[in-house]
Amino acid sequence: MKNIRNKIKALAILVLPLILFTVSSCDDDLVDHSFDQDNELSLSVSQQDILLEEIFFNSTVSLNWSSGTNQNTGSAIKYTLQMDLASGDFSAPIATFLSDVQNTYSYDITYGNLNQILLDYGSNTNETYDLKARVVADVLDTSVQDQIALADFSVTTFKPVTEHLYIVGDATPNGWNIGSATELEASNNTRGVFVYEGPLSLGNFKFAVNQDGCWCQDFYTKDPTDDSKMVYNEGGSGDDLQWTIDAELGPDEAYKVTADLLHLTIQIEIVETASNTPPFPNLWIVGDASESGWNIDSPEVFVQSSADPFIFSYEGQLNPGNFKIFAGPLGDWCGEWYRPFNDNETLTNGSVDQNSGCDLDNKWIVTDATKGRYKIILNTQNNTIQFKPISLYLIGDGGPNGWNIANPTAMQYVNGEYVFTGPLGADNPTGEFKISKFVGNWCDGDWINAATANQSINNTSFIYTVGCDGPDNKWKLQSGQAGNYEIRVNLTTETMTITAQ
């Protein structure tokens, strides 16, 4: 028996460590130690003294940090990355780049974005600031304390170049009228590069950064030692040197001006104009017969056709007197013009003369017999002009002639207003109507429509539509409203009255 007890005791001694080992292994399986981290949190900046320059706008500054420790708890760690002044305490940081992110150990910021962050904060341009970055490691296990790492660095800011650039001068389409200065097109590929392509007359020009009327704004002017270089005149300071255009171009040529604000260079080229580019971007009517009078600083403008950029149109009242058509630059009486071939030419459709200067100054004439509202259409591709007297017509089953677009009811032109006097709703007491500027087919011209669908005749608000593009709103008679009415339309003041008679 004694031998048996000894054997059992020996067996127990062998089995017990095995049981304890098994229990211990099961406890270890409850924690994923692959997430154990036990590094000291540290933060570094790729550059200590950072000179920001716009020419390196897309260069980057890198901030990198170690994982920190979760004290072998297997818990995730979230990181917050901020920037502040070296003297700050991060209670109101300049920027928070990242907040509560996991599995991230670096952050890149471009020179341009870093510069803008500092300027938005209120920093001055071209000054050096001592800064610090801070990364905070927050372990999701609340038993582990947050860790913080800091890194010091300095940054020198720059003044960004303008996002808009305008060409101004008596050589440009709008002359020295800075409020209407022509904007250059910004390059999609190269920061700080702007391009103007179009006509330039004999004269001078420079570049403005906005259209403000103050000539004390920032300008780019000619370098006194090199015509191909520019000088940045902040606040209008410095020598006001300008580039000069001394050669007129042919009808199929244009100037291309490329301004590089980062390298302060300018290139002036002569290029062939594309077949779909009109010779002038804007046209204006000038003369005592027109609403502009003899004002070449801010005359009434023609509208360029979206379908055909060579076609420009103007609609307005023409009174007894003379007029001609101005192509710019604004303010220059001896600039570019469209004029008739003979002085005091009547309003006759046909060819038109395009010329510049003050020597040959032919004009069209408007008499008492021809005065009225007109639509003038000028085709700058073949140099032809049309004068179309404006007539208005009432059309719809609420009017006398129904929906007969080939023979609508004409309104009378009386002292600058279009007048209809007659019955509404005679054939249909709840009929509709609208007003056309043409006779013919439905999509052939311009319309005056009610501002809303099924609009009451007590509401005289209206809109203009073209062809069949709509919306096809109409005025609608209500029950009991049929009767005789006077309708007056003033296209100059854009007002309408509908009065029961």
Image (spheres, grey):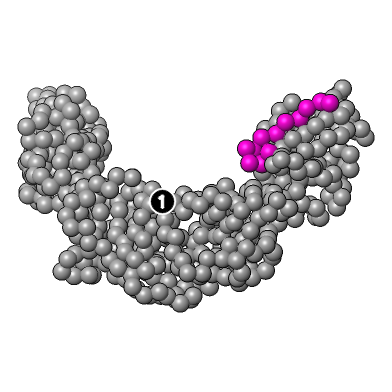
* Quadrant housing the N terminus: top left
Q: Nearer the viewer, residue 151 or 86?
A: 86
Q: Position of residue 430 (x, y in %)?
A: 86, 30
Callout 1: helix, strand or loop?
A: helix
288 versus 11 height, above or below: below
Q: Quadrant of residue 140?
A: top left
Q: Residue at x 80, y 42 (%)?
A: 411
Q: Residue at x 14, y 35 (%)?
A: 84
Q: Is residue 278 left or right of residue 8?
A: right
246 versus 262 height, above or below: below
Q: Position of residue 384 (x, y in %)?
A: 63, 68
Q: Is residue 274 left or right of residue 476?
A: left
Q: Position of residue 337 (x, y in %)?
A: 51, 64
Q: Residue at x 15, y 51 (%)?
A: 52
198 versus 102 height, above or below: below
Q: Quadrant of residue 30?
A: top left
Q: Position of residue 459 (x, y in %)?
A: 71, 28
Q: Is residue 18 left or right of residue 435?
A: left
Give the magenta-colored segment's residue range.
490-501
- Specify the amino acid type for callout 1: Ser
Q: Please rate how many residues cluster around mark 1, counting C-alpha atoms within 10 Å: few if below 14, some from 14 to 19, many from 20.
A: some
- Outermost residue toward the right? 427
